[in-house]
Amino acid sequence: MRKILFLLLIVQFLFISTSHSENVLMGERWVAEYTASGMLSKISDLSFPDWKGIYWIGHLDDQEHSKESPLQIIQSQVFSRELDEDPTIDSNAIAQLRSALSDSRYREEATPTLKDGWWTSIRWRNNNKTASQTAPLHFSLADFEFPRSLSPDEQDILESIGFTKAQETGYDISWCPHGASPLTPAKTLVDLAHFDFGFNEALTWDGIAKGLGYLMDLIPEPVTRALLQTGINRYFHFHQLVLRSHQKMLLDALEDHNLVLRMTEAERSRASTALVYADSSLLTSWKWFWKRPESVWKGEQKKEQDFRIKSRSWLITHGNETSLFSQNFSSSVETAPEKWFSLVSQLFNQNHGPVLVLDKQNPDNILRRRIALETSATLVQFTSNFIPVVGGIVSGLYESILVSREDERRFEEARLSSELEIAQGEGSEWEDDIIALSQQKLNPLQPSRKEYLNLISNRRKDLQL
């Protein structure tokens, strides 16, 4: 009997030892999980936000108190010289957007965002709000009465997005997530056992966003629809920026062979391909029926190589003395670089050259442009609900021409930040540049440098790394 028990203990020990996985740090931000047989299983992000508290995601002002009308603020973005001088922008699309903004219907209807007594026309779940003599001090998007029942995910999102009367004018738009645990685990970005993990996650989020969009189409009252669309758009915009930025950083890091020494070439390639596959939506998912993620990834690598050649040639031709930091980024030649350029961004154009990712000589330029763009985006979302047809044209083209291009710049900033972190290791050589990049990203859902270093430290302890 003792011999049998002894043999069972040996078998149990062998089973535990062979089924044990190992976590290995990859640079500052990531942890790779390997199976007992030494195969890569997952890659997780230790710095992914641990959302707790209240996050300010926008502001909706009262027209009569604004220095500029909503139309003037939007037009200042759309009629800028920068767009005219950028050959990568579809001239027909920008002409169509400007024509729509000049349409008499848009000029007439893009008036006070929240008119006197606006709350009395809304179908609230609590009728006391409708009967009130004053505008509500606070409400969430779940306070509206809807023409159909909400799914649990929809209910949770609508309850978490709120409008609070600002101290001066208008309403601050905020997001307050529910049920955050004391420390959420590191975010899995790649799961090689389930290759379509990121793809399915992207389609799930996009499905929720589309479902809420269809819900808004059922609401005839324009003010209710406008408030819903504005709050939901701001939330999903910033949320997607966080996820895409962290995916781009990891995709960039996988090109650093010193960082992935333990990975086989096949594992590195499959992890990169999974991240490319995850960059999907319900609208774009159909392309995978005739395109393989591997071929798309290789195609993107070839495009980046073409841009490297063009960018470096442009900098030399135009007398810009720069030093090659990596295959993706170049910096001005000063001892402490003041300017950083992306050599691989698809926003490269022959008039202005490669994209300027960080300008420490004029640190406020990018931030001011970004603030103006986010302000305009909020106004476009809101005002377009009051203008049939033309409003939809303005909203769609504004998103595709201006917002998406600014997002691309943000992704390049995230990639540079990641490369600087890897380059400095445990030192602080590039810390000022990393902090400068963090300060200009203007994403309320993205933690500061200090906050995500604390996240990384706490998660390392949690994983006993």
Image: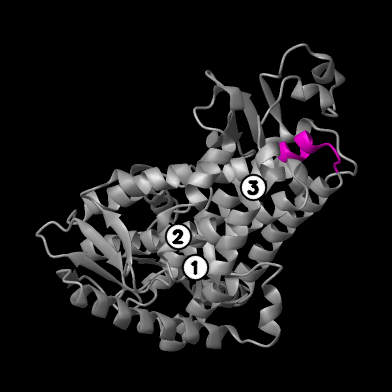
The circle on residue 83 is 2
109 vs 456, left or right, is right
Can you give x and y, in whole percent of width and height, for residue 125 in the image? 85, 28
**What are the residue bounds of the magenta stretch?**
219-227
Q: What amino acid type should be assigned to the residue bearing mark 2?
A: Leu
Q: Nearer the viewer, mark 3 or mark 2?
A: 2
* The C terminus - image quarter: bottom left
Residues marked 3 and 2 touching at CB (< 8 Å):
no
- In the rendered view, would you say 328 is above or below 288? above
Q: Secondary structure at mark 2?
A: helix
Q: What amino acid type should be assigned to the residue bearing mark 3?
A: Asn
Can you give x and y, in whole percent of width and height, for residue 295 in the image? 54, 88
- In the rendered view, would you say 119 is above or below 217? above
Furthest residue toward left: 335
Q: Quadrant of residue 250?
A: bottom left
211 vs 314, left or right, is right
Which residue is pictured at 81% across the width and 22% down the height?
120
Tell me the crowding category of disc 1: few under 14, some 14 to 19, or many 20 or more residues within 10 angstroms, Cα based: some
